[in-house]
Image (cartoon, coloured by chain):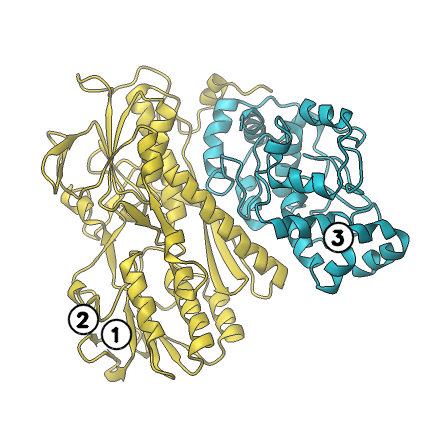
Amino acid sequence: MKLDRRGFMGAGVAAAATLSAPTVFAAGHGKPRVVVVGGGAGGATAARYIAKDSGGAIDVTLIEPTRTYYTCFFSNLYLGGFRDMASLGHSYGALASQGINVVHDWAIGVDRDAKTVALAGGGSVPYDKLILSPGIDFRDGAVQGWDTSAQNAMPHAYKAGSQTELLKSQIESMPQGGVFAMVAPPNPFRCPPGPYERVSMVAHMLKENNPTAKIMIFDPKPGFSKQGLFEDGWARHYAGMVEWVSPDFGGAVDEVRPGSMEVVADGEVVKVDVCNVIPAMKAGRIADIAGVTNEAGWAPVNPHTMATRADDSIHVLGDSSQQGDMPKSGFSANSQAKVCAMAVRGELTGSAVFPARFSNTCWSLLDSNDGVKVGASYEATDEKIAKTSGFVSQVGEDDATRAATYEESVGWYAGITADMFG
Amino acid sequence: MLRNVLNLFTALPLLFIVGLETAFADGHADVGERLFRRCASCHEVGPEARNKVGPHLNEIMGRAAASVEGFRYSRALTAMADDGLVWDEDMMDAFLTRPSDFVPGTRMSFSGVRKEEDRHELIVFLSTLTPETGLGTAHIEPSDPDVAPEILAIEGDVAYGQYLASTCVTCHQESGETDGIPSIINWPAPAFVTVLHAYKNKSRENSVMQQITSVLSNEEIAALAAYYESIQQ
């Protein structure tokens, strides 16, 4: 059978849009304009795909404050000594040379009636379609005693760059036999295996330099992603070093005291040497400002297009979105960006729109050449992005499998960053 | 594997020319074998070796270029073979440095092995490959099952394939660069279809690829194959 586009659309799996006359186009001002806020896995990918696939028919502006973007994914490997910080940094030169108008500024306001985005540096940028991919922000008061003014004493290191470097230098300066504490976040949060991969990488570093040191994880959750795999890895590689404190034993900390480097849990005061506080999260601030977030702090979206439920001219990608079953990950954001780019292009230029499909894989490193992964496929239903099937690494896999999984993750990093930044 | 290779020492003194003895003494053959995994996604070796995306590589070293029966080589490589190209160590080293520079027009979509010592290790390993050489299954996929002719005959929709490929490029780079994940561009469509079905029916191991292919229909696999065959590097 020959499957042509008409046959395909006729088969009609949730044909979100068709090849019939587009409805929006540019509202009386020449080329349609797409503005993307946030140059990470969601935003950079969306900007690149819309520019590339529209062949110049859409005017694309990408607003991103930093000139060099450090990926949060793989930043744990920097902590473990497997990557240097420079290898996580990416510039926007290739995207600019592909015709994307890259603006290094902060987006500070959205006027949904006038359809403009205000910039911190002054002026505003008009849009027909606005794509927000601002990652995460932290909830005020989520951890008693901690706010961003305490982030130098107790780093979050959950946005990569100087925070990650600070955390690493603090770990390196720990006294022999000292205590590294992590205050883990409640669900939902960016990169579900991230805190636990971080513990593995910190343990790897301490095993070499400070083998009598201890790691304590204060966790408000009764369980976590790939828990069996992580606990097995910690037992095999870092026996006796890692202690996970579940909520039943005070994992939901009473407070932290950045001044005296103390964690108060279950009424007890624990003196620590390094404290990595990863607070509860919410959508990046600009999503809030645009008025597309809900009470939980995330932006509910239409799974077919990633358009927000609140305003179909505004799409939200990645960590900030509330879409259903996908974890908040760089891979997810990249996957959602391609669906969004196709939908936006379809609306603005009438190009073909195929049914949305999504995928995600999260790799984690336990120790040298000991990689594990979890992944799934997803489809768009009217209600949510729904998981269709998935897989996860198994405890007891042989060394070659684990080494191949790590090697695969390195290949993925090269692949996704090429896909994001051109 | 080691026993097989050791037997070769007595059988094939020629191998010493490329320093196999030293390599084994230093344990370097492992390095070459590991590097070969990237090749193995397209090239089979061993007793059951068949031509796949690329020709089989049994006894590749010392062989005249473009000489495996039944493999459709690029015109570029065939022309060089007509001029007398033989895969000795120097020629192989030059080729592996950047295949598309050494054979402009080659159909092998592989960007090359940058490090000289890696190329050396790889060539040492290539020198061990004969029809009798067995390789661990962790490195070489078992022969992929044949795909039914009616499935191979499906004509793929390139535009749909391009959309579906947006999932692939998160790992398999559009440029053909490889950094731990094989290049999949320019594969002949029948090979592409065969390999994807091998993951779909789980005769090839890799949980990510099994997952990705589990949601692809026969038509979608054909569309991807058509798109990837159409890409010009």
Q: Which residue was labeled with disc 2?
A: A144
Which residue position holds label 3? B135
Q: Please report, as a chain letter, where disc 1 is located.
A: A
Task: Please report whichever mark, 1 or 2, sits nearer to the chain's N-terminal start.
Answer: 2
Mark 2: few/some/many CA within 10 Å (<14, 14-19, 20+): some
Residue A153 at what x, y percent from top left? Answer: 22, 71
Q: Amino acid at mark 3?
A: Leu
Image quadrant assignment for residue A249: bottom left
Label 3 marks which chain's residue? Answer: B
Judging by colour alone, the chain drawn in cyan in this rendered image is B
- Chain given the colour yellow: A
The residues tagged by marks 3 and 2 sit, at their Cα atoms, a distance apart of 58 Å
Alpha carbons under labels 1 and 2: distance apart: 8 Å
- Above-or-below relation of B184 to A73: above
- Determine whether A354 is above or below B25 in the image: above
Amino acid at circle 1: Val
- The residue where tag 1 is placed is A253
Question: Mark 3 to mark 1: distance in Å?
Answer: 53 Å
The N terminus of chain B sits in image quarter: bottom right
The residue closer to the viewer here, B215 or A360, is A360
Residue B81 x, y percent position in the rendering? 75, 28
Q: Residue at x 39, y 64 (%)?
A: A79
* Residue B195, quarter of picture: top right
Element under label 3? loop
Residue A70: horizontal and vertical position, in percent? Answer: 33, 51
